[in-house]
Amino acid sequence: MRLTWFRDGSCHIQNYRISLTHNLIGIVLIGGQSSRMGKDKSQLTVSSSILRHNSLSAATSAEGRTVHNDREQMTFTELAHSKLKCYVDVVYYSINKNQENLSLENTILDEHDEEGPVSGIISALRATQKSIVVLGVDMPLVTKQSIKNLIKHRNCDLLTTTYYNANSNKWEPMLSIWEIETLPCLEEYFDNGGRSIQTFLNQFGNQRVEITNEHEFTNVNTAEDLQNISIK
């Protein structure tokens, strides 16, 4: 693709001006096995303090609507959805076969639900046939501002736009953008036995976005993690 960038953040492709959310679908990855937690992490609840941390009392949707939220608790799934919905028109849930009974709209069944997030991303790209912004359900401290910043730095000419932790020299792919053009490369990588997102991102060109607050990217994997998450 040949792109020209404008000061307002839009990019120009073959004489069409598009916004950075153009053809971008939100995906909440909730299909992990949750083996260390001992129960489905997607149905865990977060406290009002974390909701305030995420500034969800007055969230603005992609259509410009202000959505007020007075709830004291939300599930991890509801929290992730509410944050993505501020920036995209449609949010899907990537689920495993054991979650088909959850009362969720817009679900995408992971075709290989024990093969890690690479499979979930492939399934989402295949189902939507659009570029996707991915948020892992087990990162409740990620703020709307970090999602907005990721989209702001989206490079439509590269396969992915991904946060990078310079201290650990690792990518943070559970908040990332995957262009639809990534699908053939990702399918070939998966078919050849590739399961590590870190390895894939190190092999292919992508837009790096530096992390300014590592605490936001804390993964909640155990009951102890859930108890210890706090707002710094």
Image (tube, rainbow, N blue to C red):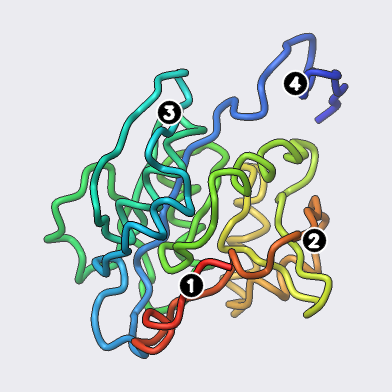
Dot 4 or dot 1, earlier in sequence: 4
In the image, residue 26 sits, relative to residue 208, either above or below, namely above
Indicate whether 106 appears above or below 137: above
Q: Sequence-wise, which precedes: disc 1 or disc 3?
A: 3
Pointer 4: residues within 10 angstroms few (<14), some, or many (20+)?
A: some
Residue that badge 1 annotates: 230
> What type is the residue that disc 1 sits on?
Ser
- Give me the residue at 50% from left, 48% from top: 125
Camera-near label (4 vs 1) is 1
Q: Earlier in the sequence, mark 3 or mark 4?
A: 4
Image quadrant holding the N terminus, namely: top right
Whole-number angstrom distance, CA of label 2 to CA of label 3: 28 Å
Dot 2 alpha-carbon crowd within 10 angstroms: few under 14, some 14 to 19, many 20 or more = few
- What whole-number distance in Å separates the C-alpha atoms at marks 1 and 3? 30 Å
Tell me the residue at 35%/28% (across/down): 67
- Left or right, 78 with reference to 137: left
Disc 1 to disc 2, C-alpha distance: 35 Å
Name the amino acid type tagged 3: Asp
The kind of secondary structure element at disc 4 is: loop
> Which mark sits nearer the N-terminus, 2 or 3?
3
- Residue 35 lies, in percent from the top left, at 33, 88
Q: Label 4 to label 1, Cα distance in Å?
A: 36 Å
Give the crowd class for mark 1: few <14, some 14-19, many >=20 residues within 10 Å.
few
Looking at the image, residue 147 sits to the left or right of residue 33; the answer is right
Q: Which mark is residue 204?
A: 2
Alpha-carbon span between mark 2 and mark 4: 24 Å
Contact between marks 3 and 4 (CB within 8 A): the answer is: no
Please determine whether, in this image, residue 81 is positioned above or below residue 167: above
Q: Which residue is mark 4?
A: 10
Lower position in the chain sequence, tag 2 or tag 4: 4
